Image (cartoon, helix red, strand yellow):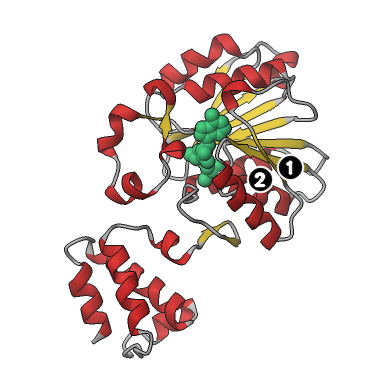
Amino acid sequence: MLRQRFYATLSPHYLQGELQSLYHWCVQEIHGWSRAEVYSRNEEEVPEPAQGTWESVMARLAEFVPIQYIFNKAPFFDFELYVDENVLIPRPETEELVQLLLDENDGKELGVLDIGTGSGCIPIAIKKARQNWNVSGCDISEGALNVARKNSDLLKLDVDFYHADASNMGELKGVDIIISNPPYIPVDRKETLEQNVLEHEPHLALFSPESDPFYFFRVITQLAEKSDVKSVYFETHATEMDDLLAALRPLWPGSIRLAKDIGGKERFVVLNIEESKSKDPKDVR
Ligand SMILES: C[S@@+](CC[C@H](N)C(=O)[O-])C[C@H]1O[C@@H](n2cnc3c(N)ncnc32)[C@H](O)[C@@H]1O
């Protein structure tokens, strides 16, 4: 039976809980069942006309190819993105980063730039929620930009995607807010990554240059400061926050604030210039 074969083939590679959700995902994609059907028809044997498809999907899963790349789909907010190996698979924490920005900024017209946009998940979610904003995304990877443009076309959203190297960007015009989930893993920590991430997600999206985890936080903060940007929203890893704050303080004249993710970890860093005009700049922790 298909289910048994799936579990037997992949149980050396995945935990039981992971296998169940992978199996459900495959049934939905290969047989077109809805999510509700997958659960309500849980006891039913899945028909096996798509033999070859199941075999090739199992072979790729056994090589730890993320299922999002196999089916070229990843959920984000209330929509689905096209993804392939040119882009990082969008993470749930990044949805939280976008929600934080939306919660803290009302509907008045703003210009927002996402630096290191990957699949375009961030600016696309923002544009969907704030149609009157001028939203753009940039990336050094042409492969990623092709994916981001494909996504904005599929979703019929007017987001401008352009090529740029964050290390070398001129003064920005018309940008009130920068948002970024930049690469921040030092190369010497690559052993800490899961095999599916290390072997399949783009290293350009994962690793910070010169093994400096704060590299992009510094260059983007300097860019924001010279461009009169009002706020910066960063996502980062919830370690070494004190060192990160210490690195950014000399570069930013306004306030620097940390925000926690849903698991209670300090994960987001928000730089704001307006607070400093009304009161002394201070870090809030
Ligand atoms: C961690 S991924 C984030 C992708 C997407 N924003 C997300 O949250 O899923 C970082 C992105 O930064 C891009 N990147 C790496 N170096 C860059 C550079 N020097 N300038 C601009 N973008 C860069 C990578 O190509 C990658 O798409």
Could you tell which of marks 2 and 1 lies nearer the N-terminus?
2
Q: Does any portion of residue 150 appear in the rendered image?
A: yes
Per the model, the C-alpha gap separating discs 2 and 1 is 6 Å
Horizontal and vertical percent position of residue 150: 64, 56
155 w.r.t. 40: above or below: above
Secondary structure beneath label 1:
strand
Q: Residues within 10 Å of mark 2 (few under 14, many from 20)?
A: many
Secondary structure beneath label 2:
helix
Q: Residues within 10 Å of mark 1 (few under 14, many from 20)?
A: many
Q: Is residue 69 left or right of residue 96?
A: left
Residue name at image x 79 percent, y 37 percent: 110
Proximity of marks 2 and 1: CB atoms separated by less than 8 Å = yes
Outermost residue to the front:
142
Horizontal and vertical percent position of residue 230: 72, 25
Horizontal and vertical percent position of residue 144: 56, 46
Q: Is residue 92 left or right of residue 120?
A: left
Q: Is residue 189 left or right of residue 115?
A: left
Q: Is residue 249 left or right of residue 214?
A: right
250 w.r.t. 36: above or below: above
Displayed quadrant of residue 252? top right
Residue name at image x 76 percent, y 49 percent: 130
The disc at residue 135 is 1
The disc at residue 119 is none
Residue name at image x 44 percent, y 60 percent: 68
Locate the N terminus and report the quarter of the image it occupies: bottom left
- Amino acid found under the numbered disc labelled 1: Val
> Label 2, on which residue?
123
Residue name at image x 40 percent, y 80 percent: 39
- Amino acid found under the numbered disc labelled 2: Pro
Q: Nearer the viewer, residue 281 or 54?
A: 54
Q: Does any portion of residue 181 appear in the rendered image?
A: no
Would you say the beta carbon of the disc 1 residue lies within 8 angstroms of ligand 1? no
